[in-house]
Amino acid sequence: MTTDISEKGLESLIMRSMTGVDGLVSTTGQVEQPLESYGGTGYVAGSPKEYDRSYALDFSQLFSFLRASQPEPFGKLAMADANDPGDINRLKFLARLSGEIGKRGVIDVLRKGIEHGALHFDLFYGTPSEGNAKASGLHGLNRFSITRQLAYSPDETRRALDLCLFINGLPIATFELKNSLTKQTVADAVEQYRRDRDKRERLFEFGRCVVHFAVDDSEVQMCTELCGKGSWFLPFNKGYHDGAGNPPNPSGIKSDYLWKELLTPAGLTNIIENYAQIIEEKDGRTGKKRRRQVWPRYHQLGVVRQALADVQQNGAGKRYLIQHSAGSGKSNSIAWLAHQLIGLKREGREVFDSVIVVTDRRILDDQLQKTIRQFMQVGATVGHARQSGDLRRFIQEGKKIIVSTVQKFPFILDEISMEAGRTFAIVIDEAHSSQGGKTSAAMSQALAGKNSCDNDAPDPEDTVNEALEKRMAARKMLTNASYFAFTATPKNKTLEMFGEALSPDAEGKVKHRPFHSYTMKQAVDEGFILDVLKSYTPVESYYKLIKKIEDDPEFDTKKAKKKLHRYVESHDHAIRLKAEIMVDHFHEQVLATNKIGGQARAMVITSSIERAIQYFHAFQNYLMERKSPYKAIVAFSGVHDNDGTQVSEASLNGFPSGDIAEKIKNDPYRFLICADKFQTGYDEPLMHTMYVDKLLSGIKAVQALSRLNRSHPLKYDCFVLDFQNNAETIEYAFQDYYRTTLLAEETDPNKLNDLKAALDNAQLYTPEQVHQLVSLFLGGADRDKLDPILDNCVLLYTGSLDEDEQVKFKGNAKAFCRAYSFLSSILPYNKAEWEKLSIFLNLLIPKLPAPVEEDLSKGILDAIDMDSYRVEKKAMQNIVLQDNDAEIEPIPMEGGGHKPEPELDRLSNILKSFNDRWGGQLQDPERQTKRIIDDIAPKVAENTAYRNARENTPHTARMVHDEALGKVMQLILKDDTQFYKLFVENESFRRELGDVVYAMTNG
């Protein structure tokens, strides 16, 4: 019999590993049947016939568990026949259980059980304490089951999940499997979830299932909340060579750790008890609450479990350095570790009396409480040492978790040194200073008894190191405390202090390494953060790139950047001039290209409070001159003398300092000008662009630039324009944390022409195909219209190119996309051919099969939403077209241009195209066309805000137009419900109607 390399074969492999059988033929599952013998890793095979689609429960496993574990209350349910779907008491109980799961989430129901009338039912028995025979017996009655080909929908009976995992009949995890040997990967599984798994189905409602896994034979991705195209899947991989993916597995397929290690009954029980949770988040601006389900990432499970195991083996007194990159979820990792250190036992005794968490991040403080609240009563457990004396009092009261700040760290050491009979775990979030400078100044005074200027305040990491060094020098290192230091960017001293010592090298030197690491490289590879180095540009390089295009006949030399020329060539470094360059760049290269779906923000890094205030006034003045609708916020600590007047950030901004982080997320605020704040520990995904006017080096350069790296579903790149530093300094600063190469400092735009020529010469596509595909893509065509064009290119790629030529073509294609992405952030005018080819190649690259020796690479469509990518590319295309149009003379006398259509003819063509597309969905299309011309368009044109935008701020006209159109459409609701409903519910219709009305009103 040949090997089954299909998706079905992977299903069978997993089932046999977990249950010992293939699961295709399951026992009937009568309620009275005794517990089947578990096989494999400890699961029993479930039957899809025993799954109740209305309640999303496996009733056979549920009733078997309740009968065995709680026979008395189960008998009191008084079900005449537990297998009869019409039994009224059965229906009442299942409805109650399903309702509780829907309201509280399956995690909480498993932990706390449910009340049904006067009866209480436990739905899960957790890990028994050592020596507790009764608890051990109950734990053994849990039923871990997995069902293949689960038909989940009451309506679509043919729709089935590949696998679904249950505990005692309650759904925990779903699986969609793919197999690379049949040319499908984890990306196809993700797409299947987004496209086919409707969140309105009972099983996919929020909180009913803990996690959804997309799995192939190499990788795993996970999602905790399905919401169509917006479902955010995260890698759940081990990592390989400090990057993404999984290492080769000598004893199986790369991804089998998922079911062989993590989802064993013991492994899953541990996650349910200590990690999985639903947390409630409140929007500071609107006050609205949103629930979010959390499942640990692989490296988070790894660090907590390894740290606990090491403490269990060695007891208290060791130091641990955890080097986890930005984007690694350190808040959750610290909270989970702190919670589990509390109850950790060694030789029958608890290892630690108290856990002290040292942090200046309010978000971590909140996260800690939310996490602990899931497992115990917070009030009796967590204390916040804010005042002097709190720490000692909490220790005496036996508080299990004490939260304090970095500035109190030296005093913490003094306090616990006097508690010789107690042991402590100190968890230090040391790489993050607070968002203000006051904390840093207080630290400096506490340690050195002196004031510190705003920009020389000590790093929190130095505070911790210095306090420990003093104790070591005095031979007073505490043996009754273990230290767990979390940092993304450890200094050499931190590595020495907390790292694990390696064997001496040939010269006798002893190097140190972190206890656990999740590297910046892996975080970038996995898409948790963006690589800020890819778009780092010193201003000199920016200027040289602009200068190179001045002699290019494709571009309008009149549009050369005069301000940039003045800055570089005449050395006029006035703040006002730099502010104008920054504001112009942001409006023309960031806002106009719809970065982050039009939500992009910028940060300005300045060298002092005085400079920040000067920049703030320069920005405000120039934004008003430009008639820009946007504003700047300034951030600095304390009160500063400005031309004889005492000013603070609150007095300049017009709102309290504590509101800055929330305000910058909302219009009209787009620029955050910083002196000594927000340059470390500030995580805002909407930050896209950074303007640096401050000397940076070493760790401070990494921390500052990393403010841009937080990911967002609509964020595909970021950009840094640096007025002070050069590429070598920044590259050197990053190399210890993430070795990468910067894009060439003086990339020649002509290289794009060379790459394009090489790609064209491979003859895999024609200009007509590129134009056709881009037109279809930007027009919102369905996938089945794009694939035939791309598949034809793939056929030529595999059939007409040998392996070396394939490698060369694919390498050139990636290089073109990478270089164009970078240059399009810099060049003020782009060639339409470049833009079209970049879109074409970004769609083609993921389809090109990888040569045998090459790692499977993911194209842009693996990670991004097609629609949002299309919006950004359309914005870029609009700029290209506008720039090209601007070059054309009224009456072209030479080739290279085109004669524009008369305005009325152009509008009639637009309306015809609109009617061709949507006429079939409209009642009386001719009447609707007349409505657009005679009613909708005139009312939009009369809108005062839109009229002002057209006249004064053309770059915002479309945004204001769309708002005006929305208001006009509301007036139509009572006259034509169908037309309004189509506008509200169909994004494509709304966008195209907007295009039509905008063309008619923006003449």
Image: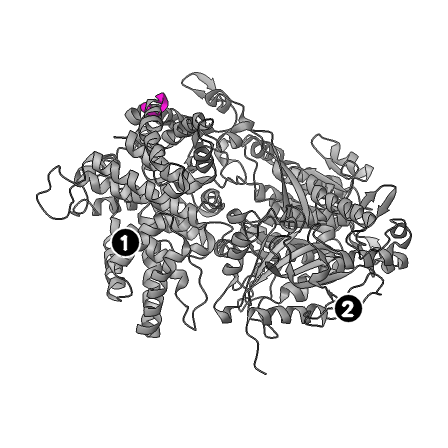
Q: Where, quadrant-wise, is the C terminus in this rendering?
A: top left
Circle 1/circle 2 CB separation < 8 Å? no
Residue 986 on the magenta segment? no
Q: Where, quadrant-wise, is the N terminus in this rendering?
A: bottom right
Magenta span of residues: 943-949
Q: Residue 522, how many percent across, how many down?
A: 51, 57
Mark 1 lies on residue = 771
In the visual, does 426 lie left or right of 620? Answer: right
- Say the numbered circle drawn on residue 535: none
Residue at the image point whose x is 34% and y is 31% from the top: 932
| Residue type indicated by callout 2 | Tyr
Residue at the image point whose x is 38% and y is 44% from the top: 872
Q: Nearer the viewer, residue 77 or 491?
A: 77
Q: Residue 698, how many percent across, how many down?
A: 46, 47
Dot 2 crowding, Cα within 10 Å, few <14, some 14–19, many 20+? some
Instruction: Using the image, determine if residue 993 lies above or below residue 614.
Output: below
In this orientation, does residue 668 appear? Answer: no
Extreme residue in the front direction: 924
Mark 2 lies on residue = 38
In the visual, does 914 lie left or right of 697? Answer: left
- Examine the image and state in which quarter residue 206 appears: top right
Instruction: Using the image, determine if residue 560 lies above or below residue 746.
Output: above
Q: Nearer the viewer, residue 329 or 854?
A: 854
